[in-house]
Image (spheres, rainbow, N blue to C red):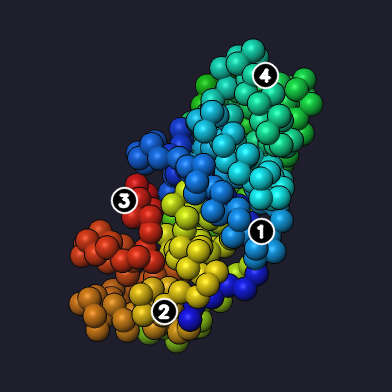
Amino acid sequence: MLKIGYLISGGIITNYKCSSKCKHCCYSSSPQWPDDYMTPSMADEIFSILKGLGCGSVHIGGGEPLLKPDKILAVLEAAKKNGVHIEYIETNASWYKDEASAHAILKDLKKYGAHTLLISIDPYHNEYIPFWKVKALMAACSRAEIEVFPWLMDFWSDIDAMDDRRPHSLDEYARLFGREYPLQLAKRYGLNLKGRAFKTYKPMMKKQPLEQVLKQSKPCRLLSGVYHFHVDLYGNFVPQSCPGLSVPLKELARGADPGRYRVFYALETAGVKGLVELAMKEYGFNPQAEYAGECDLCYDIRNYLVLERRLDLPDLKPEGHYRYI
């Protein structure tokens, strides 16, 4: 059975919809996603299970969780009810309009037990969000006595070299700091090359023969990792490094049938080689001659199953991860 006995640290994805379509987003969040948000009942169920699995604190992210500041309060309330501490709420600051409205939102967050905002500070977000909003939100947090977790201050001087009243493309950064800047940026950020981030950087990656990729294949133990997992608004357990793969948290807690979650099980037990065998035998998948590593091959198979075959597979959820990349 696919089963998780305990969890240590992770996050809650309240929504996948976002004000931005950042090139580094491993969850493929964007404005294209449905306007869904975690319901109070789902939040209560998730926090209850997490507490039972020994996870006493989480962060909240998205998408952009503060696109709907009224709805996040019910999520915070469910966390408090179940004794789960909120470490911080991730935000890109796009929702900031003015001091008065921001203060009202921050006051509510604090009232419901959120005391820290992780505010995104990087050129990827700056393609969509003018830096003045980040600066203004940080100032508003200070006045509201909300802690700021800046992610990452290492990029402050880069972004501040631009006009802070408007967004700036990565091409603009490359013109200012050199054509290698986008590649250096990924290394400085410590990017998880999944989802849209993988799509962004795949053209810069060296390809290998299929046989070599398969020879390197090993079980993907990260799929059941207890650190930095996520649980999304639909109740899916999202592995710590592999968005687009999921099993309902409540099923993993009591033991999920591997026969139902065959993609997940193949990867966890045999790695991408096992997934290739499954996809070729059951679904007519025909691999390419070369790939930029195991993740490239894995994504090629998953995209084929979801987008080309249009299969409704329970462990390849949400489908928007593939559709809105």
Evaluate whether residue 163 shows in this view.
no
Q: Nearer the viewer, mark 1 or mark 4?
A: 1
> Dots 3 and 4: beta carbons under 8 Å?
no
Amino acid type of the residue that numbered disc 2 sits on in the rendered structure: Pro
Amino acid type of the residue that numbered disc 4 sits on in the rendered structure: His
> Dots 3 and 2: beta carbons under 8 Å?
no
Distance from the alpha carbon under mark 1 to that under mark 4: 31 Å
Q: Residues within 10 Å of mark 3 (few under 14, many from 20)?
A: few
Distance from the alpha carbon under mark 1 to that under mark 3: 33 Å
Sequence-earlier tag: 1 or 3 = 1
Amino acid type of the residue that numbered disc 3 sits on in the rendered structure: Arg
Residue at mark 3: 323
Q: Where residue 32 appears, x then y in whole percent? A: 35, 39
Residue at mark 2: 258
> Which residue lies at the image location 48% right of the left edge and 81% below the top edge?
1
Sequence-earlier tag: 1 or 4 = 1
Distance from the alpha carbon under mark 1 to that under mark 2: 25 Å
Sequence-earlier tag: 2 or 4 = 4
Q: Nearer the viewer, mark 1 or mark 3?
A: 1
> Dots 1 and 4: beta carbons under 8 Å?
no
Q: Residues within 10 Å of mark 1 (few under 14, many from 20)?
A: some
Amino acid type of the residue that numbered disc 1 sits on in the rendered structure: Lys
Q: Nearer the viewer, mark 2 or mark 4?
A: 2
Q: With respect to residue 14, does 290 lie above or below?
A: below
Residue at mark 1: 51
> Which quadrant of the view contains residue 207?
bottom left
Residue at mark 4: 103
Q: Residues within 10 Å of mark 2 (few under 14, many from 20)?
A: some
> Which residue lies at the image location 27% right of the left edge and 63% below the top edge?
312
